[in-house]
Every structure is written in structure tokens, then in C-alpha cells.
Image (cartoon, rainbow, N blue to C red):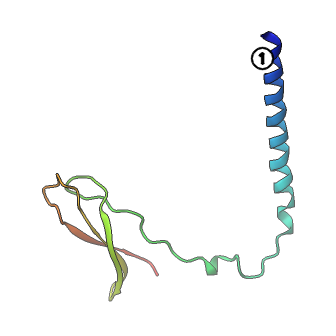
Amino acid sequence: MKKTKKLAALILALMMAFSLMAVTAAAYGADEHVHDGTCCEETIQPRKPGAAVCPYCGQVMTDIRSGHDDRGSFNEYRCDYPDCKQKGYTTKIYWPY
């Protein structure tokens, strides 16, 4: 039983050592990346707000639509939680272009 545990510990230690070598070897070639404009921050699109919380019940609201008006781009959220005293409450969250 002791030999089995020692062998298993040795194999686990070797696996961990080799995995660390693979990570450092992958990071070693990072200097060779050529910036051709496709990976620059100019091409990154803004992300919409992921969720909104109802101020009355504290539950996550449902995203019902997105759009654009004179204030900018927005997402509209509605509270569908059955126990909320303001069920059906909607709000708009604006986000940058």
C-alpha cells in the first residue's frame, strides 16, 4: 500500500512539473507576435451591460430589448420575479458606443 501511494505521488509530481514546463514554453514565444491591426484595441467592440438588478426585490432582471435613442445605445430590462412588489418594473441602462 505504501509503494502504491509513493508511486502515485511521484507520478502526480511529474505531471505537475511537466505542465509547468509547457506553460512557460508557450509564453516564451509570445515575443514573435506581429501587430497587423487586427488585434489592436481599435477593433474591440464595447460590451453591453450583462445584467441589471431590480431595486425593489434584488433579483436579476430580464433583458427585453436593446436600441438606440438620442442619449445613446441602451438595453431595457424588466423584473419578472413573481414575488416582487413592482413586478413588471422596467429600466434602461445606457452604454457607450
Q: Is residue 90 above or below residue 23?
A: below
Task: Work out whether residue 96 or residue 11 is closer to the camera in this orientation and state it.
Answer: 11
Question: Total of numbered circles in the picture?
Answer: 1
Q: Which residue occupies 86% across, 52% down?
A: 25
Q: Residues within 10 Å of mark 1 (few under 14, many from 20)?
A: few
Amino acid residing under circle 1: Lys
Q: What residue is disc 1 on?
A: 5
Q: Which residue occupies 85% across, 65% down?
A: 31
Instruction: Point out the image quarter for the N terminus.
Output: top right
Left or right of residue 26, residue 82 in this image: left
Where does residue 88 sit, x and y in percent of width and height? 18, 66
Where does residue 20 sit, x and y in percent of width and height? 81, 42
Where does residue 97 sit, x and y in percent of width and height? 46, 81
Left or right of residue 68, residue 78 in this image: left
Q: Which residue occupies 71% across, 80% down?
A: 38
Q: Which residue occupies 77% across, 17% down?
A: 5
Q: Residue furthest top?
A: 1
Classify residue 55 by image quadrant: bottom left
Classify residue 37 by image quadrant: bottom right
Q: Is residue 45 above or below residue 68?
A: above
Where does residue 6 sit, x and y in percent of width and height? 81, 17
Left or right of residue 17, residue 52 in this image: left
Q: Is residue 10 above or below residue 1?
A: below
Q: Residue furthest bottom?
A: 70
Task: Work out whether residue 47 or residue 63 is closer to the camera in this orientation and state it.
Answer: 63
Badge 1 marks a residue whose secondary structure is helix
Q: Is residue 29 above or below residue 7?
A: below
